[in-house]
Amino acid sequence: MSFWRVLLAIICPPLSVLGKGCGSVFIVFLLWLCGWVPGVIAALIILNNPER
């Protein structure tokens, strides 16, 4: 996880997970619409997952 991805996850979570697949972007976008904090948490979890 690079510094820039973390910063982008805080500012605009859906943009930070663009390279992780369409499903991840969709889930993070929906959570981001529900509230900023759930979107940021989901983006950071997805970015921290070493399997993808």
Image (cartoon, rainbow, N blue to C red):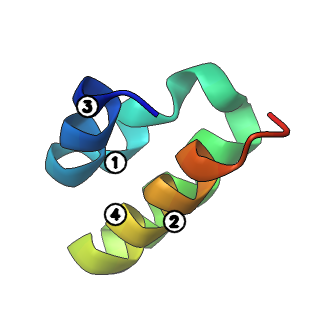
Callout 1 touching callout 2 (CB < 8 Å): yes
Q: Is residue 13 visible?
A: yes
Give the amino acid type for the residue marked by disc 3 in the picture. Phe
Callout 4 touching callout 2 (CB < 8 Å): yes
* Front of the two marks 3 and 2: 3
Please tell me which of labels 1 and 3 falls first in the chain: 3
Residue where numbered disc 4 is placed = 40
Please tell me which of labels 3 and 2 falls first in the chain: 3
What whole-number distance in Å separates the C-alpha atoms at marks 3 and 4? 14 Å
| Residue plotted at (42% across, 70% down) | 41
Residue 10 lies, in percent from the top left, at 20, 52
19 or 4, nearer to the observer: 4
- All told, the count of numbered labels is 4
Above or below for 7 versus 2: below
Residue where numbered disc 2 is placed = 42
Residue 30 lies, in percent from the top left, at 49, 64
Callout 1 touching callout 4 (CB < 8 Å): yes
